């Protein structure tokens, strides 16, 4: 779908700080991160809702892989996984590393985003990618 930002990212027509890719899924840093290392995991194919993704279990396994890698790379205390779905009509799982000193309470506030430079985003993505590669080895 040409008007779907996630489809444009999947097609390589829009930039993203990629942390994971395979033939079915991809994960990249959220451009509006709730915390350092906040990633979005999407199916490459346009699917509107997460529960319509054909291999639902495999989809969440990728999210867990990304979450565990972010935790190791960034030293987060725990990870929250969030699916809301209506803000962008393409299935996505928010992988949100949580830190003792982050600006959120027990539940993340979607209005509180962190301002990170492009250099910080590149560095974070590289660290998560490296952990994913090490995890696969």
Image (cartoon, rainbow, N blue to C red):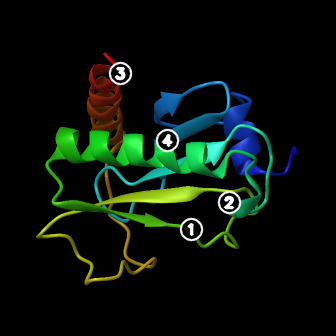
Q: Nearer the viewer, mark 3 or mark 1?
A: 3
Please tell me which of labels 3 and 1 falls first in the chain. Answer: 1
- Numbered circle sitting on residue 34: none
Instruction: Say which residue label 2 marks.
Output: 50
Q: Is residue 53 left or right of residue 84?
A: right
Q: Is residue 109 left or right of residue 57?
A: left
- Numbered circle sitting on residue 136: 3
- Numbered circle sitting on residue 62: 4
- The residue at the point 69 percent across, 47 percent down is 6
Q: Are marks 2 and 1 in contact (CB under 8 Å)?
A: yes
Instruction: Say which residue label 1 marks.
Output: 83
Q: Are marks 4 and 2 in contact (CB under 8 Å)?
A: no
Please tell me which of labels 4 and 2 falls first in the chain. Answer: 2
Q: In which quadrant of the rendered image does the N terminus lie?
A: top right
- The residue at the point 23 percent across, 76 percent down is 103
- The residue at the point 74 percent across, 39 percent down is 8
Q: Is residue 57 above or below residue 69?
A: below
Q: Is residue 28 above or below residue 101?
A: above
* Alpha carbon separation for disc pair 4 and 2: 13 Å
- Determine the secondary structure under disc 3: helix
* Alpha carbon separation for disc pair 3 and 1: 26 Å
Answer yes or no: is residue 29 visible. Answer: no
Please tell me which of labels 3 and 4 falls first in the chain. Answer: 4
Q: Nearer the viewer, residue 113 or 68?
A: 68
Please tell me which of labels 2 and 1 falls first in the chain. Answer: 2
* Alpha carbon separation for disc pair 2 and 1: 7 Å
């Amino acid at each position: 779908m040409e008007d779907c930002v996630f489809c444009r990212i999947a097609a390589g027509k829009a930039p993203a700080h990629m942390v994971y890719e395979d033939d079915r899924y991809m994960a990249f840093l959220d451009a509006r991160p709730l915390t350092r290392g906040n990633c979005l995991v999407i199916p490459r194919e346009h699917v509107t809702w997460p529960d319509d993704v054909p291999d639902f279990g495999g989809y969440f396994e990728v999210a867990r892989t990304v979450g565990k890698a972010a935790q190791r790379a960034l030293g987060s205390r725990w990870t929250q996984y969030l699916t809301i779905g209506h803000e962008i009509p393409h299935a996505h799982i928010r992988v949100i590393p949580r830190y003792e000193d982050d600006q959120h309470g027990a539940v993340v506030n979607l209005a509180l985003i962190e301002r990170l430079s492009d250099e910080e985003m590149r560095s974070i993505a590289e660290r998560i990618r490296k952990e994913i590669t090490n995890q696969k080895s």
